[in-house]
Image (cartoon, rainbow, N blue to C red):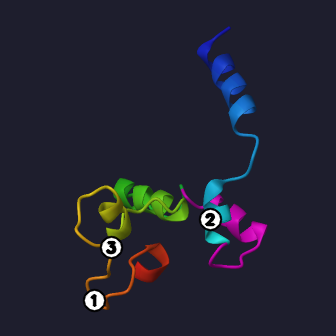
């Protein structure tokens, strides 16, 4: 067996469910599966800049760090938005 074979075995066993990002976004938005398919297929095509690809991946999977997470980790003193004073979270920021 080669490393390619082990990689295929690993993918068959671990990636059986859907993506976690669309499940978490469905709490705030109502988007169909075709939309999410287009989003994941366009990750490589939209831009060539590595940092933008990284940000897009983090945004889709809802792992962008906001003040809410910084408060949770003990880095910031509060989790309130700097501009309006509401609780800070991803949909609020963007």
In the picture shown, does residue 11 fall above or below 38?
above
Residue 37 or 46: which is nearer the viewer? 37
The answer to whether 56 appears left or right of 1 in the picture is: left
Residue at mark 3? 79
Residue 73: x %, y % from top left: 32, 55
Looking at the image, do the residues carrying marks 3 and 1 touch, with CB atoms under 8 Å apart? no
> How many residues crowd mark 1 within 10 Å: few (<14), some (14–19), many (20+)?
few
Residue 88: x %, y % from top left: 38, 77
Residue 21 visible in the picture: yes
Q: CA distance from mark 2 to mark 1?
A: 25 Å
Q: CA distance from mark 3 to mark 1?
A: 12 Å
Q: Which residues are magenta?
A: 27-43
> How many residues crowd mark 2 within 10 Å: few (<14), some (14–19), many (20+)?
few
Residue at mark 1? 83
Element at label 1: loop
Q: Is residue 17 magenta?
A: no
- Which residue is depicted at the point 46% across and 59% down? 63
Tell me the number on the disc at residue 48. none
The answer to whether 79 appears left or right of 62 in the picture is: left
Q: Earlier in the sequence, mark 2 or mark 1?
A: 2
The answer to whether 68 appears left or right of 3 in the picture is: left
Image quarter of residue 24: bottom right
Q: Nearer the viewer, mark 3 or mark 2?
A: 3
Quarter holding the N terminus is: top right
Q: Earlier in the sequence, mark 3 or mark 2?
A: 2
Residue at mark 2? 24
Looking at the image, do the residues carrying marks 2 and 1 touch, with CB atoms under 8 Å apart? no
- Which residue is depicted at the point 67% across and 53% down? 19
In the picture shown, does residue 28 fall above or below 68?
below
Q: Nearer the viewer, mark 3 or mark 1?
A: 3
């Amino acid at each position: 067996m080669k490393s390619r074979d082990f990689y295929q075995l690993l993918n068959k066993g671990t990636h059986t469910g859907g993506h976690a990002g669309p499940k978490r976004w469905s709490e705030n938005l109502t988007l169909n599966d075709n939309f999410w398919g287009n989003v994941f297929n366009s990750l490589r095509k939209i831009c060539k800049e590595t940092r933008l690809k990284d940000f897009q991946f983090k945004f889709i999977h809802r792992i962008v760090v906001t003040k809410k997470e910084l408060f949770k980790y003990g880095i910031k003193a509060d989790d309130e938005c700097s501009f309006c004073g509401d609780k800070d979270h991803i949909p609020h920021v963007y």
